[in-house]
Amino acid sequence: MILSNATVATMTGREPYGLIREAAVVVRDGRIAWVGPEADLPADQDGPREDLGGRLVTPGLIDCHTHIVHGGDRAGEFEMRLEGASYEEVARAGGGIVSTVKATRAASEEALLSGALRFADALISEGVTAIEVKSGYGLDVETELRMLRAARAIERLRPVRVKTSFLGAHAVPAEYAGRNAAYIEEVCLPALRQAAAERLVDAVDGFCEGIAFSAAELEPLFAAARDLSLPVKLHAEQLSHQGGVQLATRYGALSADHVEYATEADARAMAEAGSVAVILPGAFYTLRETQAPPIEAFRAHGVAMALATDCNPGSSPMASLLLTMNMGCTLFRMTPEEALAGVTRHAARALGLQDTGAIAPGQRADLAIWDVGKPAELAYRIGYNPLYRRIFGGEG
Ligand code: DI6
Ligand code: FE
């Protein structure tokens, strides 16, 4: 297949967006075989040509932080918060994450899967070709494993790549209240080992926060991840500064996520460790947070920034990566180019994926074709989806 007469945002090289106008992309055997100015197309690259009429081609989008597998919803809590209750107050009153745990424990694998497919389909309709999915609403061995199985099943039913993260250390369940270390030891570690043995886990995540786990409490979990040769990532410095980034970077984390309260020193540590800052404006917006992540420090230290939906029933009930891009720009003054890199190249890196997220020879042919003329249009409009076509592994 040859996509011709295209504007291609390769997301590689020095040009903004790696943009090539009047370009062609050659796809063979599910991979990019060639990309460049159409005038330079080698004569031996033949095949059916599709004229894209100047439309924009980008890498398929990647949502690198979601909680789309869960039971129930939290619309009631939304109403409570609108009446003035804070997220932390709701959590301490037995709402919040713990209420989703109840609904998730009660749900079958099929119910969890069909619930998740609603959000996966919404993301796919916006050109998403890879989604990260976390566990973390089971908080017991059996339910954590069931969530991960449901996450894996998405990939068998839809043309999308799924990467799973074990988030057993998301909250302390009622039966372990006040016994955080015992919960990690008696539930998280056995669940992680079993999930790893069943190849259900691609990375290990945790929630380092006053309402969840301290950095010291998470250390044994990260040590276990290292023993299992699994990469780590962390919800860090979201609502307060807890030292999560320092823990994560000591373990060479793929990413530190949220990071609103990260410091200059944290940004330096992330740059040194090569950890991606995953920026989650949906949670910031939903919780009406006021502390924005230190975007300027990330830029200054050369920390790669990804953007993701954090799609979850509580703090970020958002299933649109295009809206996420807009929010990254409007709320945090990221540039539209940073926003697109944040949902392609840098999102791939936050998941440890090396074969997707850019348009270059040898990369998987995961592409999104948009009915727009310039790449900044993707972050600019609100509530408008200009996807023209999506190609997944050369198909579509
Ligand atoms: N931080 C978040 O924003 C989500 N999890 C987390 O660790 C919130 C999840 C929820 O409220 O259900
Ligand atoms: Fe999250």
Image (tube, rainbow, N blue to C red):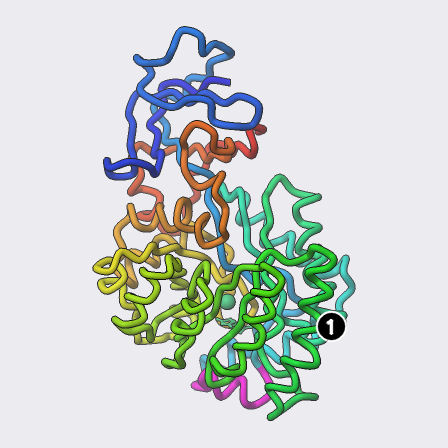
Corner quadrant of residue 45 = top left
Which residue is most to the bottom?
178
Element at label 1: helix
Q: Position of residue 96 (x, y in %)?
A: 56, 79
The C terminus, quarter of image: top right
Judge by depth and name the residue closer to the eye, 75 or 189.
189
Is 254 situated above or below 209? above
Mark 1 is surrounded, within 10 Å at the Cα level, by few (under 14), some (14 to 19) or many (20 or more) other residues, namely some
Which quarter of the figure has residue 4? top left
Q: Residue at x 62, y 90 (%)?
A: 179
Q: Residue furthest front?
A: 227
Say which residue label 1 marks.
Answer: 141
Q: Is residue 380 left or right of residue 47?
A: left
* Cβ at disc 1 under 8 Å from ligand 1: no
Q: Which residues are magenta?
A: 83-95
Q: Is residue 306 left or right of residue 88?
A: left
Q: Position of residue 196 (x, y in %)?
A: 68, 60
Q: Choose top left, top right, bottom left or bottom right for residue 25.
A: top left
Amino acid type for the residue under numbered disc 1: Val
Viewed as shown, does residue 253 lie left or right of 94?
left
Residue shown at the point (32%, 71%) measured from the top left = 266
The answer, for residue 212, to whether it is visible in the render is no
Residue extending furthest toward the top = 43
Q: Would you place residue 176 above or below residue 9 in this image?
A: below
